[in-house]
Image (tube, rainbow, N blue to C red):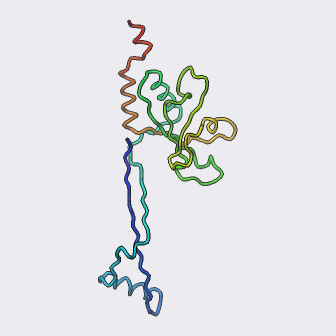
């Protein structure tokens, strides 16, 4: 489970007509009156709200090959699937996209990470919600591929999975020992 720092910002607004010799004098007068409690803004001056979230989950930064190997090991050992994130470089695109638009969540349950599958598909969804369940393996490979800047996995998931892999007896070994 990820952790987020969510900020709510409400904006109150009051427009005033002020007589003054200059713009700065008008600002100074209103500022002084506001500080002295002449102007109290309330619900009737509500002008809008914004809510922003920042993912503060500790992350293990890895490259795509490390993620591929870890996801493959998860599948080969029958462990619980995990999610990782692929962040594509801003210069992969001919227009500007924010970080959440360039970051795709991908599951270890994709064919690309499963041995013996007839295919190499990777389906993922970008964090801003505009691209859902998109097949990105074609964007990673081929002509004019998107460049992977880095990948990451929530540190808690990474540590748990690595520890499970260290202590786990692969399915094929447990069958052979019978």
Quadrant where the C terminus sits is top left
Q: Residue furthest right?
A: 143
Q: In the picture provided, is 112 more to the left or to the right than 43?
A: right
Q: How many numbered circles are shown?
A: 0
Q: Position of residue 59 (x, y in %)?
A: 41, 41
Q: Position of residue 166 (x, y in %)?
A: 37, 23
Q: Nearer the viewer, residue 27 or 175?
A: 175
Quadrant where the N terminus sits is top left
Question: Which residue is drawn at the image coordinates 31% and 81% (left, top)?
Answer: 35
Q: In the picture provided, is 75 more to the left or to the right than 31?
A: right
Q: In the picture provided, is 123 more to the left or to the right than 24?
A: right
Quadrant position of residue 29: bottom left
Question: Which residue is drawn at the image coordinates 41% and 28% (left, top)?
Answer: 80
Q: Residue furthest left?
A: 36
Q: Position of residue 72 (x, y in %)?
A: 50, 26
Q: Nearer the viewer, residue 72 or 41?
A: 41
Quadrant position of residue 157: top left
Q: Position of residue 121 (x, y in %)?
A: 59, 31
Q: In the picture provided, is 33 more to the left or to the right than 140?
A: left
Question: Which residue is drawn at the image coordinates 30% and 82% (left, top)?
Answer: 37
Residue 19 to residue 10: above or below: below
Residue 173 to residue 109: above or below: above
Q: Residue furthest top?
A: 178
Residue 100 to residue 40: above or below: above
């Amino acid at each position: 489970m990820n952790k987020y720092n969510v900020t709510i910002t409400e904006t109150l607004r009051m427009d005033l007509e002020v007589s003054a010799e200059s713009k700065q004098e008008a600002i100074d007068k209103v500022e002084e009156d506001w500080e002295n409690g002449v102007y109290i803004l309330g619900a009737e001056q509500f002008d809008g709200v914004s809510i922003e979230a920042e993912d503060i989950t500790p992350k293990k930064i890895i490259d795509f090959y490390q993620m591929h190997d870890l996801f493959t090991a998860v599948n080969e050992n029958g462990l619980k699937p995990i999610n990782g994130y692929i962040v594509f470089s801003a210069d992969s695109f001919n227009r500007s996209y924010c970080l959440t638009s360039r970051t795709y969540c991908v599951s270890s349950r994709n064919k690309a990470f499963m041995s013996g599958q007839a295919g190499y598909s990777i389906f993922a969804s970008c964090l801003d919600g505009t691209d859902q369940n998109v097949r990105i393996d074609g964007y990673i490979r081929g002509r004019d591929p998107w460049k992977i800047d880095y990948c990451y996995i929530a540190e808690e998931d990474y540590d748990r999975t690595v520890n499970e892999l260290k202590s786990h007896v692969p399915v094929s070994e447990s069958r052979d020992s019978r």
